[in-house]
Amino acid sequence: MPLSQTDKGGIFLRLRRNVGVSLISLIVVAACGFVTMFFNARALGVEGLGIYSAVLALSLMLEAIAGLQCWQAVIVLSENRESRIFGAALLVNVASASIASVVGVILLFFVAPTQGWAAIFLMATLALRLSEPFIGLLRKYDEFNYIAYVRSLLAGLGVLTAAVLWYTDAPIAYYLVAAALVQLVQPLALYARTRRLCAPARPTGSDVKEVLKFSTSSGISGALGAIRQRGLVILLSVIAGAGAVGLYTVADRIASVMQMAFRAIFEAVFREMPSLENPWKLIGTLGAGGAFLSVIAVLAAYLLGDWVIALAAGEDFRAAAPALTILVAAYCLSICTLGLRAWVITKIGPAAMLACNAFAILSLVLGIVLISTYASTGAAMTQVVFEILWLLAVGAVIYRHHAKSRTAKANNA
């Protein structure tokens, strides 16, 4: 059964354990990512890496959109009916992923018309790669360690395939096929575990409607985030070309160490947030700790970024150093506000997060100008603009929420 609030030493002990497990696995993933990038950057070069990254960005963007953040619905809605909610989430995900596969194949003709069958294979297998309901169930049962193992396994397979492709001097098409096959391992591994915890039951119509309603709000919010991150790469490819995408990809891969830390903490905090009556102490602690670590991270990126890029990707990618420092700053802003993100979704509702992300996505409009002027560095600047706009929006949402609460209390009195 899922853990109660008092199981295994309480919320903060579970948070430390779950964040620790996730961070350890993500450190492994980051290390493997560096090694993978070492092979890919040297094998494909700046232009080749840009083409590969643009196609992969399209695939990952559609995968994130089709996922609809269903893992959140499994956690929040499954009280006393988890088998049916789990089944409803699977049903919703299969339908959305099938649609995304078709859309992906169509969009390929505009993004990467020269990649042919390999890119089509990557898009066609999208419906089989979604794992959101499995991840949600595992998090509900506090199985963060197993998710960590699967992530580490995928990262290790990524290194192995990159090394083989580099050694055999394979074309870009083989890289795309290998990416699809590696990603197919995740749902299979997660299913092997979840089938022992909870078998999906046939959902009622109301179950499907409830999951679809919840996931539409949270999923659109997540989709906006995917469009902001992955769509930015596609926009960069269209405006500045594959070379700029190659530089940005290297900078983003290195800076994503900060993003991985954000992801690990957010996943653990989100699991606990619904049970907290007064979450502001936790939010304040996370914000202060994030700010301290952010200063160190930005300084390290500024001082050591050029050296790290040359070591990880080669001398040809040194021009990505300014983008790296700016991206680290953007992801640090995300870490400082992760407690607010979890609180807004669980306490106010996913629609509020949708409104914040919808406002912040306006950064892409400014991004067109920034990318046209500064190429890969302009894309990194766009990420910072997004985080600032999001923070302004969430401040307005929280102020409105508390104003409504005060009005309601005054009327009741």
Image (cartoon, rainbow, N blue to C red):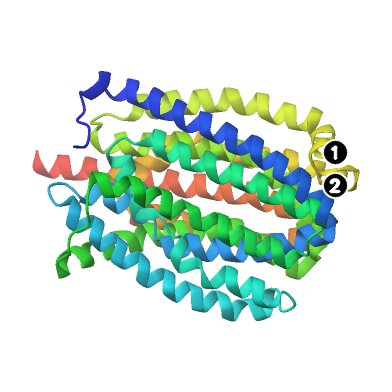
- 103 lies above or below 266: below
- 92 lies above or below 38: below
For marks 2 and 1 on the same chain, the one whose residue lies earlier in the sequence: 1
Q: What element carries label 2?
A: helix
- 342 lies above or below 221: above
Dots 2 and 1: beta carbons under 8 Å?
A: yes
Residue drawn at the location 56% of the way across and 27% of the way down: 291
Q: Name the residue under label 1.
A: 310
Q: Which residue lies furthest to the right in this view?
A: 315
Which amino acid type is marked by label 2?
A: Phe
Can residue 364 be seen in the rendering of this structure?
no
- 225 lies above or below 79: below
Residue drawn at the location 70% of the way across and 39% of the way down: 34
Q: What percent of the width, then of the height, locates residue 122?
A: 58, 68
Q: Residues within 10 Å of mark 1 (few under 14, many from 20)?
A: some
The mark found on residue 65 in the picture is none
Which amino acid type is marked by label 1?
A: Ala
- Report which quarter residue 251 is drawn in: top right
Residue drawn at the location 73% of the way across and 47% of the way down: 163
- Report which quarter residue 243 is drawn in: bottom right
Q: What percent of the width, then of the height, locates residue 146?
A: 40, 37
The mark found on residue 317 in the picture is 2
Q: Which residue lies furthest to the left in this view?
A: 413
Q: What percent of the width, then of the height, locates residue 326?
A: 71, 42
Of 50 and 344, which appears nearest the observer? 50
Q: Quadrant of the C terminus?
A: top left
Q: Residues within 10 Å of mark 2 (few under 14, many from 20)?
A: many
In the shown orientation, is residue 175 left or right of residue 81? right
Q: What percent of the width, then of the height, locates residue 402?
A: 29, 41
In the shown orientation, is residue 65 left or right of residue 293? left
